[in-house]
Each structure stands twice: as C-alpha cells, then as structure tokens.
Image: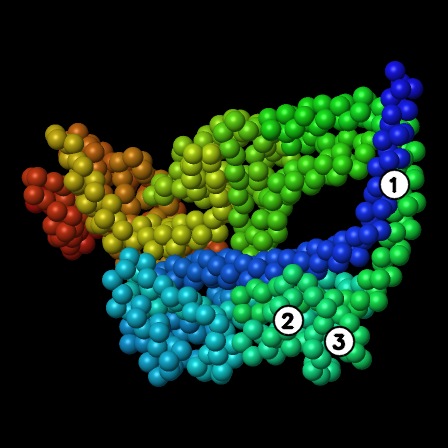
Amino acid sequence: MQKTFIKYTFFIVTTAILLILFVHFLFNLNMLERQQYDTFYAKTEQMIHTLKNNREELDQLNESLDEDYLTRAKAASYVMDRQQEVSIDVEQMQYLADLLNVDELHVIDEKGIIVSASVPEYVGIDMDDHEQTREFLALLDSEEEDPYLIQEERPNAAEGKVMKYVGVARKGQKGIVQVGFKPTRYLDAMSRNTYEYIFSRFPTDTGEELFVLDTADGAVLGHSDGMDRKFEEECYRLERLLDCKEGAYLTGENGKKMYVVSRQYDDILLCAALPQSILLQKLWKNVLVAVFYLLFIEAAVILLLNYLVKRKIINGIDHIIENLTAITKGNLDTTVAVGGNREFEKLSDGINTMVKSIVNLSDRISAIIEISGIPLAAFEYERGINYVFTTSGLSDLLEIPASKAAELYKNSELFDWYIRKIVKDPIEGEEDIFKLRDEKYIRIHMSESAEGYLGIITDVTKDVVQKKQMQYENTHDPLTGLYKLEHFKQLAERHLRELPKGKVCAIVMLDLDHFKSINDTFGHDAGDRYLQGFSDVMQSMPKEHILSARRSGDEFCMMIFDCEDPSRIRQYMHLFYETLKQNKVMLSDTQSKAISASAGVAWTDGPDDSISELLNRADEALYEVKNSTKGTFAEYGK
C-alpha cells in the first residue's frame, strides 16, 4: 500500500508541478503585481495602524496625565486647606511643589489674586487680567461638589512659556489651588507622530518610494527619501494618484515607469511606488526559484507526506489542544512547543506571544505607574481563572514575601481571601484606608463586574501620618503634651452628653502657686520643667475617669467623669494631691521643690449643666482657694 501511495503521489505531484509551472509562467507578471500591491497595501495598512496608534497614544497619554495631574492638584489643595496662614512664602511653596513633583504651585484667594506661589514673580498676579488665567475664576463660584479645571497646554500669561495647568477649588476656604506642569512627555509623543518618524519605521526595498499627499491641495507632506527635491512628475499628481487605488503605472523621475498603489486615510493619501524594471527582475528570479522549490517539494512530499500526516500533524494538533486546555484553566506558565512544520511553529509562537502579552500587561502598567512616580499598584482576577494579574509593585505595597506573593497570584480564591481579610477593618474615620502595621497605611479600592474584580492599592502612609500629626498638634499643648482648652471642651461636652443616669462628673480648675517667683528666681527653663512636672502628675491619673488640659500659662483644668457620687470625685482629688506631694522638680543643680497648686471643683447638679457653666463655677471655687489657704482644693458652694 505504501508503494501504491508513493506511485500515485509521484504522478499527481509531477502533473501538478507541470501545470503550476505553466500557469506560473503565463500569469507570473500579473501575480507579481498583485503581490507588490499586497505588499504596498500591507505597508500602508501598517502606516495607518501606526498613525492610529500614535493618535490613540496621545489621547491615552493626555488622559493619563490629566488624571495624574488632577490627583496632585487635589493633594496640594488638601495640604493647603490645613495651613493656618493665609499665604505661604516662596521657599515653602517650592518645597511643597517638589514634594508633589509639580513644576509650579499657586494659591489664589477669593478675589482671584495669586497670594502664594513657588515662582516669586507670580505673587500678586490678578487672574482676571488674562484670558489664559481667567478660565480658572469660574471655580470660585462653581456649585459642583469638587470643582476642578484641567487646561490644555498653552503659553502662560506671565512668561509665555508652554505649560499645562490644573486648578481645584479649596474646601477649607474660598479660593483655588493651581499646579503647573511642563508638558515634556506630551511634546515628545507628538514628535513621534511626524511622517519622517513613521517612514523611518518602515524600511524600503531597492528603488521603492513611500510618500504622503494632502487630499485638499495635492501637496506632498512627506517622502521616504526626504523633501529636498521638487515633486513635479506624473506619479506625484493628486488627480492621477486617486486612480491608483488598485495599482497602476505612472511616469516617474527620468521618464521611468513606476508601479504605484495609493490609499486614502482621512484627509491624506498614502502612496507606495516601485520601478517597473525591478518588478521584471523579480519575475525571472521568481520563475527560477519556483522551478527549484517545486522540484524540491516533489521529492519532500513523496518522502515525508505519510510521516507528516501520521506522526507530525495529528500529534502536533493533539499537543496544542492539550496546552490550550491548560492555559484556559489559568496555567499561564504553560509553553506551547510543537515542531515539525512551519505552520505549527508559527501557531505555537503566536499562542506563546499572546499568552506572554497577557502576562506582561501588568508589567506595562507597572512601567506607566513607575513613570508617574505614584506609589500605586493594581490587580485583576476573573471568575473561573486561577491566575491573578498584578503590577510589579503589589507585593511591596502589601509587604508580603516574593514566595508568598507568587503563591497568591496563582490562586485567585486565596488572593481574594487575603485582600478581603485586609479590607474588613478600615481605620477610624475612613472607608477605604487600612493599617498594615505601625506607620504603614494603604488605600484599597475594588470594583466588581460580571467578569471578576479590579483593584487599585495606594500607599497613603505619608498622608495618614501627616494628618495624625496635624490633628495632634491642633489638639495638644506643645510644652506639656496635655489637651488644648478648646479640644478639652469638645471632649468634656461629649462625656457630659453621654453621662449615664445616676452618675456625676466634675470640672476642676487648677492654678500653680508662686509660679511667677519660680520663673523670676530660677529662670524660664526651670519654670518649664515645673510646668512639665505638674503635667506629668496630671497624665498619671486614671485616664478612664480623668481628662487633663492646659488652659494657659500656669492654669490647668481637669474633668473627672463617670463617677458614682461626689465622694468618688473627692477620692480622685485626694489621690492627685498625694501624688503631687511625692513628685519634686529640680529647679537648679542643687535645689528641688514639691509642686504646689490650688484647685476649684464644681460638679454637675442637673441635666441642663454645660461645660462653660461648670468651668465658671470651678473658677469661682479656685478664686476662693487662691485668696485663702492655697495648696489645696475647694468645692464650689462650700
């Protein structure tokens, strides 16, 4: 049977080869033109694809930069809203601009005047004086929740240099925070959209020309050989080139015939041309090559056809199906490697390239994030697929070892459990900020779709720490570490409102005895130590029942709350004075002194009591003590 197969195969292949040679000889020129047309069409298709990609890249880059710039502008507004001063000097503004990685930073007041700026020359500019700056004034009267404006690149009003500005309305007070950026990346991307750059990406064959015409006026916009010559020949005339969409011969330079193919895209005409003489050379070369390859193929087909069909083709297909099944189950590390013929090799390479492109998607996103300078990572996983797509910085943000990260990325259910364990316990006052460890905070935002989940993780440690520090500084006295009076009143009012029925609380006003003489005798440093020693005693009292604060100078106050009766309050006062006697303060190298303080106590006697009333009563009691015994406490009304 094998001999019969070979006999008939030889007869069929030989007959086919003779017919192919005959047809090839008769129609080779026409086919060669068609091949050249396909080649030119493919090149113009690639050029169109490149033009589209460049435009999409510009749009995506502009959108990405706008989002990044808006984030920085909001961060700047956040910082500015926590500044107590109306304006900040240039050096501080430049420092903030460097922290936010912006080129310019401006603060505009409610009148539209720049009151602070990282560029000193801009301070005092009236935004209403120029069309470029006037657009931002609409933010002052906007009724939107978070109004902002992202302005396109243009020369600025002050110096005429090309900048991109983003402005957001302040929340703490009426005004605008504006940041400016030099659009370097956008201009670089624009430079890659020129015809000179596009032609450089497509190498031309010998004698081949690529050029572009404007369909409006027929002007040559670009040429693969440059623009240093006139284009007066027939093959550069718009009216003739419009008839070359299926390929045609036109007269070129020095009267030689050129095979030209044109293709219109938007308002331009893409053209490719090749001398007819080169096509004829290819004709004879193709005929000879065809004879050689056909003879080789005849022998190869007879010897290998049976082997390829039985062992290579079927086995290769089965192997590819097996690998594809593994890939669809989420095993993206699977490599398809099927040899034996070019088709299988190309198919394997194509599948591997596709899988690699999917896996490397996170790397490309990581590169964009690294360029932006934002500590951010992203992840995505779909239902029914084990693999988790992540950017490269995810394990660092989550502070998990590389081995554990690799294990999580290969199991979407385990990864989902790990993330949800983190997000179930946000920090106080926030919905999407979570504490990983001491002084490490991250923001996790997840969105769910029909396909799966998409998440973004950002390191917000710096923002949270700064916020806590600012809160502490706003509520605590810097010398003693006690609460400031206003914050003390807020906490005391809350305890008073939440006071359980049947329990009492008291306000205590305290004043250090003879403090002026200590300052005059031993100096203000000794006086500060005296104040700190007194505050240490106050802070040593049971915090579940006592709030402490510094009122001003040597005046302090306490709230004793959640007590069963006044006798319990008196016990705490006696405990305080006993502790005070046991703590002495070194006023000099040789002298120490026990702290002496007078106090007035006033506790609640009805549901309508307020902290202000209790403070006044305690103050009256303190006044009586200061004018009599000193060094002890007295109760209001006794």
In depth, the one of 204 and 421 nearer the eye is 204
- SS assignment at label 1: helix
Q: Position of residue 568 (x, y in %)?
A: 20, 32
- Hey, what amino acid is under mark 3? Gly
The quadrant in which the C terminus is found is top left
| Mark before the other along the chain sequence, 1 or 2 | 1
Residues at marks 1 and 2 touching, judged by CB atoms closer than 8 Å: no
Residue at screen point 65% across, 28% down: 324
Q: Position of residue 49 (x, y in %)?
A: 61, 57
- Hey, what amino acid is under mark 2? Leu
| Mark before the other along the chain sequence, 1 or 3 | 1
In depth, the one of 328 and 187 nearer the eye is 328
Rounded to the nearest whole Å, what is the CA distance between mark 1 and mark 3? 38 Å
Residue bearing the label numbered 2: 241
| Mark before the other along the chain sequence, 3 or 2 | 2
- SS assignment at label 3: loop
Residue at screen point 69% across, 77% down: 234
Q: What is the number of the mark on residue 18?
A: 1
Q: Is residue 113 visible?
A: no
With 506 as the anchor, is 556 left or right in this view?
right
Residue at screen point 65% across, 40% down: 354
Corner quadrant of residue 317: top right
Above or below 155: residue 619: above
- SS assignment at label 2: helix
Q: Is residue 128 visible?
A: yes
Residue bearing the label numbered 3: 252
Q: Position of residue 505 (x, y in %)?
A: 17, 38
In depth, the one of 501 and 361 nearer the eye is 361
Rounded to the nearest whole Å, what is the CA distance between mark 1 and mark 2? 39 Å
Q: Position of residue 48 (x, y in %)?
A: 61, 60
Using a 10 Å C-alpha cutoff, classify the residue at mark 3 as few (fewer than 14 neighbours), some (14 to 19) or many (20 or more): many
